[in-house]
Image (cartoon, rainbow, N blue to C red):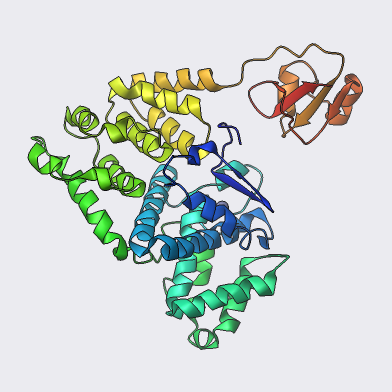
Amino acid sequence: MPPSFPFGGMENPCLTFVTPCLLAGDRSLADVIIHEISHSWFGNLVTNANWGEFWLNEGFTMYAQRRISTVLFGSAYTCLEAATGRALLRQHMDITGEEHPLNKLRVKIEPGVDPDDTYNETPYEKGFCFVSYLAHLVGDQDQFDNFLKAYVNEFKFQSILAEDFLEFYLEYFPELKKKNVESLPGFEFDRWLNTPGWPPYLPDLSPGDSLMKPAEELAQLWVAKELDMKAIEAVAISAWKTYQLVYFLDKILQKSPLPPGNVETLRETYPKISDSQNAELRLRWGQIVLKNDHQEDFWKVKAFLQSQGKQKYTLPLYHAMMAGSEVAQTLAKETFIATAPPTPAPPQCSQLRLTDRGAQGQLEALGLASASSDFAGFQNTVPKFQFSSQIPEVYTPLGKSGLWAWCL
Ligand SMILES: [Zn+2]
């Protein structure tokens, strides 16, 4: 997809869309490809019955992704990657507040709730924790893997609710049903589904310690007022994989702001990180730069945001800019203006085709429809306009969101 494609991937049946940000040159972001392929079973073959149950798609897919990753790359690497996912969930809950109604697995999409806001880390990472918890209750990986196959087989080509899945789980494991695992205090299935907040159970990620500990220790060295460069340079990060660097940068971010001057030394010491073209590293470097108000590198944040439009990268950086200094806030506004579609003049041609993504207000703003007219009315007013749900290659944006037109 074009770099502006706002998602990492989209699992259409038999055709996966992915962002070009994944082309890191070293296959280090292949986990997204594994994720999208996993959706063939969890999401496409068995589908959530409504968008309030989105976690059924994403929680299972994260679980499947990490099971496959464990087989392919080992548990140390997979636990490290899962730890970066957990850090994203932490950041998300810190920004929104743990008690935010969208921080439960089953969400209510009702008037006033922006469906875009339901697309966040909770259905992914909290969903992963719930599926991991159910596997933990079973206690045997092979048995749980077999259960997942049976689950897909039971519900294939169907749209289901959490109850369908959980009833099947308890029937499949009668000894768990006998123990009333659905109502263990603190871990009630109902609590998992309907209470916002941090997951009651976190899977054990200690197999990743061999990769995480060195990254944590190195991050700790960078917190000192007087940097121990000998100790820092003794750690050879050149052999580290991308997610180990990501983990290290997440720790630096958590400890930021660092003492004055340390970010500049960090930048000079690790050009592999600060000049990286890998999107996961560019995101973290941008977050560190903003949290430390390291204005010399603000241009990198802007360049990154101008190069791609993936929501996972864009939202945290805009949040960080707007929570930052006045200069950072100005950067946010400048970058937004530089990347937003231009304010349009209505296209000049005899006929236009429009595609609507729910933004009749855009028409009104352009004087193409009156406030009281509905789309039928609008079609009557400008009969040469046609509507379509598809966006073609060549289009003209009308306004800043939602509506696109092209000449017939
Ligand atoms: Zn997914």
Q: The N terminus is located in which quarter?
A: top right
- Name the side, left or right, on which 340 lies relative to 234: right
- Which image quarter holds the C terminus? top right
Is residue 160 depicted above or below 405 in this figure? below
The answer to whether residue 113 shows anywhere in this view is: no
Q: Is residue 297 above or below residue 346?
A: below
User: Who's the residue at 45% across and 46% down the image?
Assistant: 29
On screen, residue 118 above or below 167: above
Residue nearest the viewer, comparing 126 with 83: 83
From the top left corner, tell me how far across and down residue 40 is, in percent: 63, 59
Q: Which residue: 18% across, 50% down?
A: 217
Residue 388 image offset from top left, x and y in percent:
81, 33
Q: How many dots with numbers?
A: 0
Q: At 44% across and 30% down in the image, what residue appears?
A: 318
Q: In which quarter of the view is residue 281 placed?
A: top left
Residue at image point 58% right, 82% down: 172
* Left or right for 58, reference 259: right
> Where does the image place residue 63, in percent across and percent down from the top left?
49, 63
Task: Answer yes or no: is residue 314 visible.
Answer: yes
Instruction: Indicate the position of residue 113 as horizontal and vertical percent values.
Output: 61, 44
Q: Who is closer to the viewer here, 336 or 16? A: 16
Q: Is residue 229 left or right of residue 346?
A: left
